[in-house]
Image (cartoon, rainbow, N blue to C red):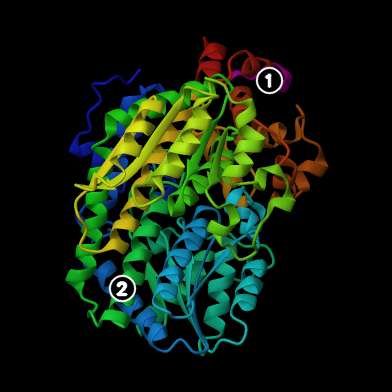
Amino acid sequence: MAGSDWTCSLSTMHEWESPDYEPSLPVSEKSNPLTRDIDRASANCIARMLQACDAQMFQEETGGTYQRLLSDQVVETLMEVSKRVELILKDPQDSLVVLSGCGTSGRMAFLITSAFNRALRELNQSSAYSYIIAGGDRALLSSQEAPEDDPRLGMLSLKKACEGKRRVLFIGISCGLSAPFVAGQLDFCLQHPEVYTPVLVGFNPSNQARDEPIPGCTFTFRSVVQRMQELAKSQKAFLINPAVGPEAISGSSRMKGGSATKILLEVVLSAAHAAAFTNTPITHKGILQHMSAYEKTLDITYAQNEGLGALLEAAGQSLRCGRRVCYLGWGPLAVLGLIDASECNPTFGADYNDVRGFVSGGYKELNNNEGPLTSLGPDFCIAHEDFLHLVLPSLNDQDVAVLIYTHSDDVSEVAKLARRVRAKTANLHAVYHQVDGDTAAAAQQDDINKLCLSSLKITWPSPASGSLLHMQWELSTKLLLNAVSTGAHVLKGKIYQNHMIDVQVTNSKLYSRATRLLQKLSGRPESQCEEALLKAVYRVDKLTVDITLSDIATHTCIAKSRTKVVPLALVCLLTGCSLVEAESHLEQQPIVREAVEACLS
């Protein structure tokens, strides 16, 4: 067990930058040296490891191997893109800024467009932003991996969103420079330069963009990137792709990938708004100042490490007992709870009910393109009322409930809900933000503290700008909830070393990741690993000709309904046992690392 004595050395912080470190993998898929033993770590130690990983986002460029968040070239590009947004804000007629992505990237696109359209409404301006998420709005709340692989679907959804527009700034987000859905959109922009200016946001260097053929297409993601690089010389396309270091859990781009997306695009859009509506020029210094406010956000958030460790331990304990974690939020912070919860299923192979998010005001607060999705079933019921009817009656002291709010929300409402939840479970916790010296809600906060097992109070200095403070609160809440849900699943045994061992193999990216992971953990050749993976997908000890001749889309379609695919394949590879024997090992010992060790001993 990595105990409370875990410390982070400078050399470990930078180890991933060496050209010799996991050279065959792009940065976004490498394993992070800081978290090698996260699967054996205590809750407090997990919190410290995640803090160290997040701090890598703001590391300075060293020796020029990788561009970083604060590199001059990146800041210059942010300024240029910001000026393009400013032009649209000043003359919005027939113009649009579109943000698009898959999974977390699409959810961040939604969150950011919502916030900036809200800011425009407050200025009596019409909306200028639109979001696209692969799989449509149901993907905001649940995993929809298959549409990521469909470039034509990406292109058609962009075409539809931009009907009748004469000028579109398209911002495609793909953390690994890999999603075919986004590649299809960028390719479409490149074919129609008279309307579209494409911007690509991701976190791998261009030469690490995915180069696998996309079925039915003449282009790969890398070839699209190469065409954009050429056009970037004359500012007809823009690439924003600093490296932020490997994720704490390999390939889990919901973490740093999501956070860095939020930081970069909020910096761009905030600078454009300030230029368009308060005549504040867009400057290098201004961009860096905004970035440093986000860096301070990390410090302020992780200053709460002890309280975070306690919350993480409680959530882990709950999941280990087969119980659930519920986030009950207010305002935009509630949406971050929804997003965090929705990501646990594809990342950890979690059940949809293991971690759930609920929003005060439900779909009215969410204000998504397609409106209420409640007709899709109870999994899409997201209002506090839904929680009270569907979830609260079955809660007990092993379930964790987390209240997420700020002191600018209606704290008396928070207290009212807290009393109702406390009647069912003592395992109630609060995460809240307040400005230093703001005592308006002090009495109600005291009442809430008395009802809660733990209260994580995050105090912020008096802000120069209200909108920046709200963005900091959002980032801070994202970091905290990512830490709680990741840490809880680590404690439940869903991670092997620092790999998502229980990942669902539901699209081509995840299929490749699963094969690579089996190679790395078993030391066996690729062909043998892919064979073991397919046996686990099809639940057979011998592959038929039909199976071996099928394409990846067929395999991932079958894998949708399967659980523990990668753990089963790994146990078979390492022990030579049959699938039935592997299943029985995993039933007796659901913590994969221990199941493997038991088999080998």
As helix, strand or loop, the secondary structure at mark 2 comes to helix
Magenta part of the chain:
575-583
Residue 355, position as x, y percentages in the image? 55, 35
The residue carrying pointer 1 sits among few (fewer than 14), some (14 to 19) or many (20 or more) residues within 10 Å by Cα, namely many
Q: Amino acid at mark 1?
A: Glu
As helix, strand or loop, the secondary structure at mark 1 comes to helix
| Residue drawn 40% across the image and 50% down it | 409
Query: Is 544 rendered above or below residue 259?
Result: above
Q: Give the image quarter of residue 458.
A: top left
Query: Is 594 rendered above or below residue 449?
Result: above
Query: Is 401 rendered above or below residue 183?
Result: above
Residue 464, position as x, y percentages in the image? 20, 62
Task: Report whether residue 523 is seen.
Answer: no
The number of numbered discs placed on residues in the rendered structure image is: 2
| Foreground disc of the pair 1, 2 | 2
- Work out whether residue 266 or residue 231 is closer to the camera in this orientation and state it: 266
Q: Earlier in the sequence, mark 1 or mark 2?
A: 2
Residue at the disc numbered 1: 583
Residue at the disc numbered 2: 77
- Work out whether residue 43 or residue 209 is closer to the camera in this orientation and state it: 43
Q: Give the image quarter of residue 10.
A: top left
Q: Amino acid at mark 2?
A: Thr
The residue carrying pointer 2 sits among few (fewer than 14), some (14 to 19) or many (20 or more) residues within 10 Å by Cα, namely some
Q: Give the image quarter of residue 118.
A: bottom left
| Residue drawn 17% across the image and 70% down it | 285
